[in-house]
Amino acid sequence: TEDKDNAAREVENPLPGFRLSAVLRESARDKTIFLHGQVSGDDEAKEDAVVILERAPFQAESVSDLLGKNPPMTLQLKNDIYGVYHLSPPPELNEVKATVIRPATEKHIKKYLRQEVYLIQESGEDYKNITLPFIQAQSFSIQWVYNILEKKAEADRIVYENADPENGFVLLPDFKWNQKQVEDLYLIAICHKRGIKSLRDLTADHLPLLRNIMKEGKEAILKRFGLQGNQLRIYLHYQPSYYHLHVHFTALGHDAPGTTVERAHLLNDVIQNIEMDSRYYETRTLTYALREDEALLKSFKDAGKF
Amino acid sequence: TEDKDNAAREVENPLPGFRLSAVLRESARDKTIFLHGQVSGDDEAKEDAVVILERAPFQAESVSDLLGKNPPMTLQLKNDIYGVYHLSPPPELNEVKATVIRPATEKHIKKYLRQEVYLIQESGEDYKNITLPFIQAQSFSIQWVYNILEKKAEADRIVYENADPENGFVLLPDFKWNQKQVEDLYLIAICHKRGIKSLRDLTADHLPLLRNIMKEGKEAILKRFGLQGNQLRIYLHYQPSYYHLHVHFTALGHDAPGTTVERAHLLNDVIQNIEMDSRYYETRTLTYALREDEALLKSFKDAGKF
């Protein structure tokens, strides 16, 4: 192998001598597959690689052009007005996106491996005895959240702010949303007040904050993006991915990840529950899913609760 | 056009002279697109057609064979150990499923047209004044449910039964599940007692029934399919698709339709809420989504509530 043609070779062939070790995960719905394989490294040694393949979405123009050219279609079944056919479009309409991680470590391989998930029933006592000590011991860094609140980062991305330190918040687009179309709109409201870790900490004291987020968040999204409040799903996650209170705003028609009943809590329900009982979220048994490899699941196991 | 070669032509070319009228719906996540087009009918007249295209899931064996042959890959971006490439697999690995509906009526076209969805906040009063009269006026037939409960239909599909007329139920696979793999397990528990229309009718009187469904449903699924109770998502829909109380059991790892927070209610939460307040579901404001063309939305509009 000559160094000088190394770059060109890499472009053409990132997976020399690929041999499959395992299928890590696949989704028939999403048309994705995650593979672990071995490839030939630079010095002939074997090297681990993770390859993620994903089929391309259809483009209306190119597929309607194709159908207009009467492409061969193989009949699979026909019943009255319904027919099912197979069609093999030309290669340029079948681009597959391949993400290659190489060399891949054990950690990469584990990250993409399909994990079993289990439901946890976390009582108020379990929260105090297991989850809260776990959160405190992990000391997750939320400096990046403080940077946003203090305008040290992402200041130009802020869509709306209520600057009140007690009942105010900042609203900005989530990184998952490219802001090009409202169909998959996704924004996050982050409260200014520090120390509210999650749903579990909310009491009647926080009703003004929660009502501000609900009302002003809707107004700001209508004004900037033209989506009405009744076209928005407004919710919190439990467990959240970081322990500083934040609220998700997604387009109702968008099947965003993390909107399932075992993770999402509608802000409207949260407000109603606290109005009914200020200690609702302190005492309530909350249900959520944990992956087999998550550290919190280990804490529940160690406590004999799983 | 000769009649005798008509059958063969249909196989090869179900969409002669296809011209796109509209993209009805598309999903970048699912890699599907729904098209409305016009085609040439038998007597040269134009005819409406609906075409649904869906890309095939990957098959591990064929894609790993392909990668082993060092196919050309075009570099899109590279950063440290991560690279993104485009790959054009040969036609036999790119089969597209085309469902053709022809001739398509206005109703077919409307069925597949993407509809706006709106959130409804239904108070206890709204239920009594708008939703309940709507349900009663529709007189949806649930004879098919009674046929199951009376063993006049699907008796061989029953997985478990508690025959108690007050607190019993029948558990059977949902039609969406082919029963071939537990990854997308989906069963339904239908209560024997008649007249419980939905969540709204549940009170402390129904706790024995709900607890039976929870406990015995889990046990039956563990015994027959080997999935543990903490690997199941057990929930009710509000609004339900039919007004006879039933409970959904899906594999927790399966992203089944109707599991989002604005439609699904965990049975565990329902039991807790009724234990706390027997009238919880009579009085509570419940949030759910309705499509623009749904008749219930019109009832809310007519009542000036939307």
Image: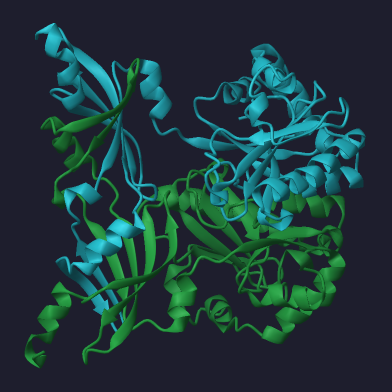
Chain colours: A cyan, B green
Taking the image as shown, residue B22 lies to the left or right of residue B118, namely left
In this view, the residue in front, B24 or B132, is B24
Residue drawn 27% across the image and 45% down it? B58
Residue drawn 25% across the image and 62% down it? A65
Taking the image as shown, residue A14 lies to the left or right of residue B271, namely left
Residue B242: percent from left, percent from top: 62, 73
Which corner quadrant holds the N terminus of chain A? top left
Residue B185 appears in the figure: yes
Residue A255 appears in the figure: no
Taking the image as shown, residue A217 lies to the left or right of residue A253, namely right
Residue drawn 16% across the image and 13% down it? A6
Residue A106: percent from left, percent from top: 36, 16
Q: Quadrant of residue B168?
A: bottom right
Residue B86: percent from left, percent from top: 25, 36
Q: Quadrant of residue B117?
A: bottom right
Residue drawn 77% across the image and 59% down it? B286
Q: Is residue B136 above or below residue A22?
A: below
Residue B111: percent from left, percent from top: 48, 74
Taking the image as shown, residue B35 lies to the left or right of residue A77, namely right
Which corner quadrant holds the C terminus of chain A? top right
Q: Quadrant of residue B41?
A: bottom left
Q: Is residue B80 above or below residue A122?
A: above
In this view, the residue in front, A228 or B290, is A228
Q: Is residue A305 above or below residue B201?
A: above
